[in-house]
Structure formats: structure tokens, C-alpha cells
Amino acid sequence: MGLCSTSSSLKSGLAAAVLLALVSGCATPPQTEGKAVAVMNNEVYDPLEPMNRYFFDVNYALDALFLKPVAEMYRGVVPLPVRDSVTNFLTNLSQPIYLINNVLQGEMDRAGDNMGAFFTNTFLGVGGLFDVAKLNNQQEDMGQTFAVWGVSEGPYLVLPVFGPRTTRAAVGGVADYYLDPVNYVAHENDIDNVGIIRSAVSALDQRSRSIEALDEIEKNAIDFYATIRSLYRQNRNNLILNGASNSTQLPSMNFDDDDKTAKKN
Amino acid sequence: MLTTRRFFSGILVSAMALAITLQSPAIATETKEQTALTLVTNIGDEAVQILSNDSLSEAQKRDQFEKFLDESFDMERIGRFVLGQAWRNATEAQRTEFLKVFRDFMVASYSDKIGSYSGEDLKIKDATSLNDNETLIHSMIVRPDGPPIKLDWRVRKTDSGDKIVDVIIEGISMAQTHRSEFASVINQSGVDGLISKLKDQIKTASN
């Protein structure tokens, strides 16, 4: 998992871009049968559903066996201020890649906030252990940047271990890894496996903060897979729009046409 | 002299006419948003009042919640929306059955969150118009611990007054989530399959 030389990372970046173009090109949902059908398709569009459901079950089992118990132990043993510092440290470490993505999306004010948060928390917050800046910067990644650039989301995927992704976000994740300055700094200083350790700690951090929420969602779901898929997609759209509730995103709830057809029948 | 006067009075009249034509829809949208704001504000006040009232038992609070769901939500519209495409092909009996079961499902899945109330408050922020009939009311759940939660209410004008048709938590629409989930179940086992799954869920939730 170590970082390769610059030329090969450029190559994999290109390969990722080509893959993305291919996938999004052949994955546009059919839009022939009118707008309502197109919206519906878009909402449940999941051509890889059988495979996704398989990996969803695999991940569910892995979570039940490893991640959830460890997250519960972590929460039980490690006091809250320490866990908060772990969260703060991880968030601070992500500010450089957030900044890069905000610049690529043309969000200069947000990029400035990333810069402010990073320097304030690194120097005044003891290397990022304390959130002094309190800017609450939102997560930014290449998946969102691709979306801003107009790349369509591609089929929904459930990756083994990593979990739900749109194809766009999955490719973006690879691009983020090769763009992230933190990985280069770690590589320069001969720190191995930064990517793996960072992913593992942030998985633990996030899981420990979502135990009740996920249990609740599972309890109320009649199809847990479909619920997670919907929640994941809506949340991604929300991140792409930077939290601005875009009212045009909401589907129409008019049924006046239905009424007419119903009366005819 | 006369021409200038005429000219000015002409301008004045047309300006007034313009002002009137521009203003009448503006007044209409404002009242639509105003009534929606009032509705959600009242709901928020009432909900907090009921939830924080220690003299009420949990069962009483549940009854209140059921009453609130029936009175303030356009359950039929939500039910039709969440059934999506399947509504068209469903028989009249299936539709009636589904609407009844869906309502009970909502009661069952949301009413057991009543016990977990711990001093949250609802702060109403502002309103944006979605279309001629609908308004989005933006609000925040202010929690005693942890960051506030963004909560939007989609309010629709109906024949029987303003009704809530969707609740959007941190950008996640409850109606859309249910619709997407139900579509998946209908794909596998049809509307009858969905109805029986919802019934199972209601049974396990009430135990």
C-alpha cells in the first residue's frame, strides 16, 4: 500500500479517470419513458444489485464480528475527551485534501476555511488534537469534485470492507489517495502503512459514533440494504450541494394526473 | 405644461398598476409561507410541551403523537408518494390496505423514539417557497449535548388546511427514503409482499 513513484501515481490517476469515463458513459439510466420513470430509475438505479447485496451481507457479517464489537469496546474503555481528540486529529489531517478539492470545485472561501482550520488547529490545537478553530468544515473529496465537474454518479457499488460507494465516489477515493499531501509527507518520512492505519482508525472513530443510529435504522427498516442505499445516495447529494437544501432536488408530490387516469379507469 | 403633467400622471398610473400586479402574487406567497410557518411553529411548541411534560405517561404521549400524525400530516399523499409507480397498478383494495398499514407503520416506528427525549428544542428559522402549493420550513433541533440537527418540513396547501408531506433531516428526505426502500421490496415481492412485511414490522415494534 506504500506510495509509488510520481510517474506511476500519475498513471494510476489517469487509469482511474479513464475508468470513470467508461463507467459513467455506459451507465446512464434509460430515460425514454418520460420524466417520472427517469426519476424513479434514478432513485433505485442499481444494475449490480445482486453482487452489491452479496457484499452488503459480507460487510454486515464483518461489522458484526469485528468492527462493531471493537467500536463498542473503544467507546466503553476510552474516555470521551480522548475520543474527541482522535476525531479532531483525523479531521485536521483531512483539511489539506479538503482544501485541494475545494480549490478544484472553485469554492475559494471554503478552501480558505480549510487553510485556517489546519493552521490554527495544528499550531494552537497541539497538532490537531483540539479543535480551536471550530469551523466545522464539511468533508470534500474527489467524488464530489467530479460531480461538480458534471461527471454522472455511475452505478451504486458496495465494496468489500469499504462499504457503499457510487462509482464516481469510488474512483474519487483512489484519486484522493494519490492527491493527499499527508500521504506524501508520510512517505517522505518513511512512515509505512499510513493509508491503512488512517482508514482503520477513522472507521473505528465513525463506527463508535454511529452505533445507536445504525441500530435504529436497521430496526425500522424492512429492507436494510435499500434503506442504506437511499440514505447513502441522499447524503452524497447533500455533500455535493454543500448542504444547501436545493429545493429542485425534491421530487414532485403532485398526483393530479394520477387522479384523472384513475377516474377514467 | 399640460403634456408634462399628463406624462407624469401617466407614469404614476402605470407605476401603480405595475405595483399592484407585482404585489398581489407577492402577498399571496407571503401568506402561504406565513401559514406554513405558523403551522410548524405550533407543532414544535406543542411537541416540546408534550414531550417535556413529566405528568404524562409514555402511553399518553404515544396517543398524542398518533393524533398529531393524523391531524398534521397528509398521510394519504405521503402513502401514495412512497408507493411510487406501484400505486398506479395497485387495486383499490390494495391501496386502502396499504394506506392503513403505512400509517400504523409510521406510528410504530416513530413513536418508540418518544422515550429518548432529553431536552431538545425546535428552533424555526425561515421558509422558502417550493411551488404554488408547497413551502419548505427550515428549522433546527437544538440539543443539550452535541451539534444542532437541520430539520426541514415540507408543507402543502390542501383542501383541509396546511399539511406536512415530508420531513427532511440533514438533507435526508424521509418520504424519499421510504419510497426507495418500498420500491425495492415491491420489486421482489409485490405490493402484497410489502404490506405483509410492514405488518410484521408493526408487530415486532409493538412487542
Image (cartoon, coloured by chain):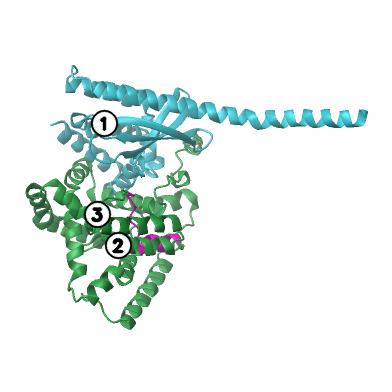
Chain colours: A green, B cyan
Chain at numbered mark 3: A
Q: CA distance from mark 2 to mark 3?
A: 45 Å
Inspect the magenta stretch and tell me whether residue A18 lies in it.
no
- The kind of residue on which mark 1 rests is Glu
Chain at numbered mark 2: A
Residue shown at the point (35%, 75%) measured from the top left: A13
Q: Is residue B128 left or right of residue B69?
A: right
Q: Quadrant of residue A89?
A: bottom left
Tag 3 or tag 2, which sits nearer the N-term? 2
Q: CA distance from mark 3 to mark 1?
A: 30 Å
Q: Secondary structure at mark 2?
A: loop
Q: Which residue is mark 2?
A: A48
Label number found at residue A125: 3
Residue shown at the point (8%, 47%) measured from the top left: A76
Disc 2, disc 1: CB below 8 Å?
Answer: no
- The kind of residue on which mark 3 rests is Gly
The x, y position of residue B150, in whole percent, is 34, 40
> In the depicted view, which residue is nearer to us: B3 or A43?
B3
Q: Is residue A11 left or right of residue B63?
A: right
> In the depicted view, which residue is nearer to us: B125 or A133?
A133
Q: Is disc 2 in the same subunit as disc 1?
A: no
- Give the mark toward the camera: 2 or 1: 1
Range of magenta residues: A135-148
Q: Quadrant of the C terminus of chain B?
A: top left
